[in-house]
Amino acid sequence: MNIKLYQIDSFTGTLFSGNPAAVCPLSGDWPPDSLMQHIAMENNCAETAFYIFRDGRYHIRWFTPATEVDLCGHATLAAAYVLFLYEQYEGRELSFDSKSGLLAVRREGDYLTMSFPEDTITAVETSDEIKACFDIEPVETIKGRTDYMLVYRNEEEIRHIFYDLDRIRRIRARGVIITARGNDCDFVSRFFAPQSGIDEDPVTGSAHTTLVPYWSGVLHKDEFTARQLSKRGGFLLCRKKSGVIEISGKAVLYLKGEVSLPDEILNNGKGGKP
């Protein structure tokens, strides 16, 4: 059995930047979770998106090399890009059923715009455990549903901060966002999630469901330009609406091919533990 495989660079219009995601369109029903985890581990991208079309709707799931996650922005963008450009989807808007609810994506020129549920954020005390993760103490700590977000004074602190992945791994969260006002955009960020198998994510769409509500309250506006300051870098346009965060970005194809699965793998659904 062969499964189509695309690799897409998301939140960029330039190859070898943005955040790479693998996309595997599937037919029929979901294969065993262990098999999808093996494929994601072998792809070794931050996320692999698997989608199926069933009962008149698209359904999507995301796996890091280590675990399944409930929401992934750049891999959703990549999956929509594949459908719009390579899998003969004829509309200008589509939606995915997911563990995080219904996720809509529309095509607007060179940009794809995703509608994600807004995160619920709360200011919390900066614990000693969090302080030990970085060499600069944040001015504020925010807790979302799945992540901590640390606010810093300026872009230079975000660019040059020293971080301890072993200590970040001990934080009980999906990951840790760090952010500050940007020099040539509204805000910048970085995202670390070694506990989810991703030391530093190149561009994290889902983190902006936490970032945008915070910066909307600080900057008193609802539309934003944002940069993620990883080595690869990425650019996003964001908009806050009622209960929804719209996240827009470009994407570019890196490769397309097939995953070849031997019969013995398909018969037992796993082929060993990841």
Image: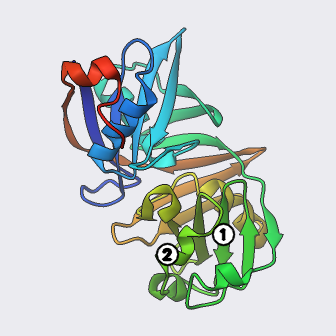
- Left/right of residue 155 with respect to residue 269 in the rendered view: right
- Left/right of residue 161 with respect to residue 271 in the rendered view: right
- Left/right of residue 174 with respect to residue 198 in the rendered view: right
Q: Quadrant of residue 3?
A: top left
Query: How many other residues sit within 10 Å of disc 1, few (<14), some (14-19) or many (≥20)?
Result: many
* Residue 16: percent from left, percent from top: 25, 59
Reading the image, the residue beneath label 2 is: 166
Query: How many other residues sit within 10 Å of disc 2, few (<14), some (14-19) or many (≥20)?
Result: few
* Residue 256: percent from left, percent from top: 20, 35
Reading the image, the residue beneath label 1 is: 149
Its colouring scheme is: rainbow
Per the rendering, the mark at residue 113 is: none
Q: Quadrant of residue 6?
A: top left
- Residue at 62%, 33% in the rendered image: 99
Q: Amino acid at mark 2?
A: Asp
Question: Cβ–Cβ below 8 Å for labels 1 and 2?
Answer: no
Whether residue 163 is visible to the viewer of this picture, yes or no, is yes
Give the vertical position of 176 relative to 72 (above or below): below
* Residue 234: percent from left, percent from top: 41, 62
The kind of secondary structure element at disc 2 is helix
Whether residue 186 is visible to the viewer of this picture, yes or no, is no
Pick the residue in front: 80 or 110.
Answer: 80
The kind of secondary structure element at disc 1 is strand
Q: Earlier in the sequence, mark 1 or mark 2?
A: 1
Q: Amino acid at mark 1?
A: Met
- Residue at 42%, 25% in the rendered image: 32
Looking at the figure, which quarter contains the N terminus? Answer: top left
Give the vertical position of 246 relative to 166 (above or below): above
- Residue at 49%, 82% in the rendered image: 163
Alpha-carbon distance for marks 1 and 2? 18 Å
Give the vertical position of 3 relative to 183 (above or below): above
- Residue at 59%, 91% in the rendered image: 136
